Image (spheres, rainbow, N blue to C red):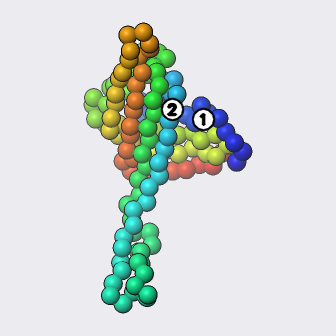
Amino acid sequence: MTIQRGKDLLLKLDSTGSSAFVTIAGLRARSISLNAGTVDVTHSESEGEWRELLAGAGVRSASLSGAGLFTDGAADAAIRQVFFSGVLRAWQVILPDFGTLEGLFQISALEFSGQHDRELTFEISMESAGTLTFTEAS
């Protein structure tokens, strides 16, 4: 993978549950964090008193966040509707020249801010809520 522009990482939302993904808003910053918990199975006879972990037993999760501005009312309305209804929706994260991460997420935080002489901005945070799939870019 070559060096990529940060603006090329996209967050897409399936706002209706119909598998029709649309890019959300004008995001200026976004990130994804993949996590894998561990299960410690160390005991009194562990060799050299080194920690032992149980392979594949931990909980896996992903966190997504983004900040930017809404470019149209439809994106704003879709995100607000998903947040206030508390539903799980499918999201895609497009990682340029790497692939697409897709799965259910719940919006865990939605913040709006603005200064009197600047545009309205927002921040969004989401947590995974099920199995995620990764499809490599072709």
* Residues at marks 2 and 1 touching, judged by CB atoms closer than 8 Å: yes
Q: In this view, does 124 lie to the left or right of 86?
A: right
Q: Look at 36% across and 21% down and name the residue there.
A: 113
Q: Farthest residue toward the left?
A: 85
Q: Farthest residue toward the bottom?
A: 45
Q: Is mark 2 on a helix, strand or loop?
A: strand
Q: In this view, does 76 lie above or below 31?
A: above
Q: In this view, does 101 lie above or below 38?
A: above
Q: Look at 35% across and 40% down and name the residue there.
A: 106
Q: What residue type is labelled 2?
A: Ala
The residue identified by callout 2 is: 29
Tell me if mark 2 has few (under 14), some (14-19) or many (20+) residues whose alpha carbon lies within 10 angstroms of its own. some
Who is closer to the viewer here, 111 or 48? 48
Q: Position of residue 136 (x, y in %)?
A: 63, 49
Q: What is the C-alpha distance between the residues marked 2 and 1?
A: 8 Å
Image mark for residue 129: none
Q: Look at 51% across and 23% down and name the residue there.
A: 26
Q: Look at 38% across and 17% down and name the residue there.
A: 114
Q: What residue type is labelled 1?
A: Gly
Who is closer to the viewer here, 5 or 48? 48
The residue identified by callout 1 is: 6
Say which quadrant the C terminus sits in: top right
Q: In this view, does 21 lie to the left or right of 98?
A: left
Q: Where is residue 27 in the image (x, y as percent from the top left)?
A: 51, 27
Q: What element carries label 1?
A: helix
Counting residues from the start of the chain, the first of labels 2 and 1 encountered is 1
